[in-house]
């Protein structure tokens, strides 16, 4: 009686390895309905973020980007009073166009939405440029072609939440709806000559700057609330606020707020069970104890 031959490895030689990988690529492309056979997905997510998305029924589809530049008329930054309406319009237009372009790209790759959107704001004297980049995600299907992500968005959602935050949010029954922004640019009135001279050697509050900041904040936050209502959201997460004088026009106060509108789409809120993980691979910084003297 002779011994049975050892089973041949699927990757016994380079030719078989390339053939098997090619077949795997074709099967994945067919399962996801890709237009180009063998086309792979792209993402700027880490490995653990991809695995977390798989746990809630999503997978990365493609990195998507968009940008828009809107001109600002010359002369709007000269010293004046009240809102810089041309700047308000330029910001809203640039943000809206960039957001719409990102959603169009997500539709083209068959995605449900875009996560971890990085937003870059470049505000120059003569133009506002806004750039967005994120990873479009689609519903992952099992071997039977069934998708298990519970929400069917009519249009792709956009959010700047990380994949980890997205998973925690979705497990609690809340889901992102859209990126929203509110912005306002307001001139700060000048102090009178007598007040400026009299306060030159004093520590005093610059009341015109303070009141202008309050005015810019109220205008921007009001527009942000309108945007949340427009997309039918009930809350806002990961808000990034910038409130400061413009670098090229110090008498103009800028207040911008950008975040992700969210909504409870489950029947009830769920308190997810979270586990704390403490990394133990931190680099130990060496130091000389003699420096403590």
Image: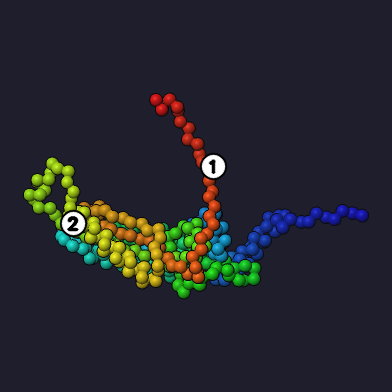
Badge 1 crowding class, 10 Å Cα cut-off, few under 14, some 14 to 19, many 20 or more, is few
Asked if one can make out residue 103 in the rendered structure from this viewpoint, the answer is yes
Which element type, helix, strand or loop, lies under badge 2? loop
Looking at the rendering, which quadrant does residue 56 occupy? bottom right
Q: CA distance from mark 2 to mark 1?
A: 50 Å
Q: Residue at x 37, y 63 (%)?
A: 67
Residue 216 shown left or right of residue 32 in the figure: left
Residue 251 lies, in percent from the top left, at 19, 54
- Residue 188, numbered label: 2
Q: Is residue 231 left or right of residue 268?
A: left
Direction left: furthest residue: 194
The first of marks 2 and 1 along the sequence is 2
Residue plotted at (57% across, 61% down): 55
User: Residue at 22% of width from left, 65% of height from top?
Assistant: 85
* Quadrant including the C terminus: top left
Q: Residue furthest bottom?
A: 154
* Residue position marked by numbered label 1 in the rendering: 281
Check if mark 2's residue and mark 1's residue have beta carbons within 8 Å: no
Q: Of all residues shown, which one is farthest toward the right?
A: 1
Residue 139 x/y as whole percent: 54, 68
Using the rendered image of the protein, determine whether residue 135 is visible from the camera's viewpoint: no
């Amino acid at each position: 009686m002779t011994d049975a031959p050892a089973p041949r490895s699927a990757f016994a030689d380079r030719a078989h390895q390339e053939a098997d990988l090619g077949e795997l690529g074709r099967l994945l492309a067919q399962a996801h309905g890709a237009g180009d056979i063998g086309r792979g997905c792209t993402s700027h997510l880490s490995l653990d973020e991809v695995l977390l998305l798989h746990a809630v029924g999503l997978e990365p589809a493609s990195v998507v980007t968009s940008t828009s530049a809107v001109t600002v008329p010359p002369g709007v930054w000269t010293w004046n009073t009240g809102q810089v309406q041309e700047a308000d319009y330029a910001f809203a237009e640039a943000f809206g166009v960039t957001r719409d372009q990102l959603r169009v790209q997500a539709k083209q790759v068959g995605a449900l939405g875009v996560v971890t959107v990085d937003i870059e704001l470049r505000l120059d004297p003569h133009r506002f440029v806004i750039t967005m980049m994120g990873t479009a995600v689609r519903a992952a299907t099992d071997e039977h072609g069934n998708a298990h992500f519970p929400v069917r968005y009519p249009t792709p959602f956009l959010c700047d939440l990380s994949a980890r935050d997205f998973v925690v949010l979705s497990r609690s029954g809340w889901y992102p709806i859209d990126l929203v922004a509110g912005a306002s640019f307001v001139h700060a009135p000048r102090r009178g000559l007598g007040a400026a001279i009299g306060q030159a050697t004093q520590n005093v509050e610059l009341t015109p700057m303070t009141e202008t900041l309050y005015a810019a904040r109220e205008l921007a936050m009001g527009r942000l609330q309108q945007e949340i209502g427009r997309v039918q959201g009930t809350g806002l997460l990961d808000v990034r606020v910038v409130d400061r004088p413009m670098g090229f026009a110090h008498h103009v106060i800028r207040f911008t707020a950008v975040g992700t509108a969210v909504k409870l789409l489950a029947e009830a809120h769920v308190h997810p069970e979270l586990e704390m993980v403490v990394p133990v691979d931190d680099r130990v910084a060496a130091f000389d104890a003699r420096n403590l003297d």
